[in-house]
Image (cartoon, grey):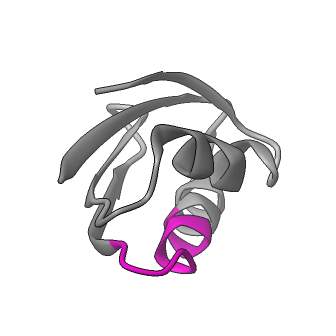
C-alpha cells in the first residue's frame, strides 16, 4: 500500500537519508523516496502499520506530522 508521510525536523540531505534508511530497514517496505523540500516520504509500505512507520522515523529523532 502506498503511503505518504509528512515529517518535521529534516534540515539537510543527511536527515533525509537517515529517514530513508530507517524506512528501508522495515521488512516489506519498497520504493522509498524522501523529499527534503516537501518534508515527506513516499513509499510502498507492504504490510507495515502506520504505527511501525511512525516509530521507525520517530526513533531516529524526527516528528511524523501525518500518514496518508
- Lateral position of residue 19 relative to residue 27, left or right: right
Q: Tell whether 18 sits left or right of 58.
A: left
x 36%, y 72%: residue: 29
| Residue 28 at x, y percent in the picture | 36, 78
Residue 4 is left or right of residue 53, and the answer is left
Q: Residue at x 74, y 42 (%)?
A: 58
Q: Is residue 20 above or below residue 38?
A: below
Instruction: Give the percent coordinates (x, y) of residue 65.
Output: 54, 18
Quarter occupied by residue 5: top left
Q: Is residue 41 magenta?
A: no
The residue lying at 18 percent from left, 53 percent from top is 1
Range covered by the magenta-colored residues: 20-29
Q: Nearer the viewer, residue 39 or 41?
A: 41
**Is 20 or 54 nearer to us in this picture?**
54
Q: Quadrant of the C terminus?
A: top left
Residue closest to the far left: 2
Q: How many marks?
A: 0
> Please, which residue is most extreme toward the top here?
65
Residue 60 at what x, y percent from top left?
Answer: 80, 54
Give 23 or 12, whichever is nearer the viewer. 23
Residue in the image at 29% along x and 66% along y: 46
Amino acid at each position: 500500500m502506498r503511503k505518504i508521510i509528512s515529517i518535521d525536523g529534516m534540515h539537510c540531505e543527511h536527515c533525509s537519508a537517515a529517514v530513508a534508511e530507517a524506512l528501508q530497514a522495515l521488512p516489506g517496505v519498497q520504493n522509498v523516496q524522501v523529499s527534503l523540500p516537501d518534508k515527506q516520504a513516499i513509499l510502498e509500505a507492504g504490510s507495515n502499520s502506520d504505527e511501525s512507520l511512525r516509530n521507525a522515523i520517530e526513533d531516529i529523532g524526527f516528528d511524523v506530522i501525518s500518514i496518508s
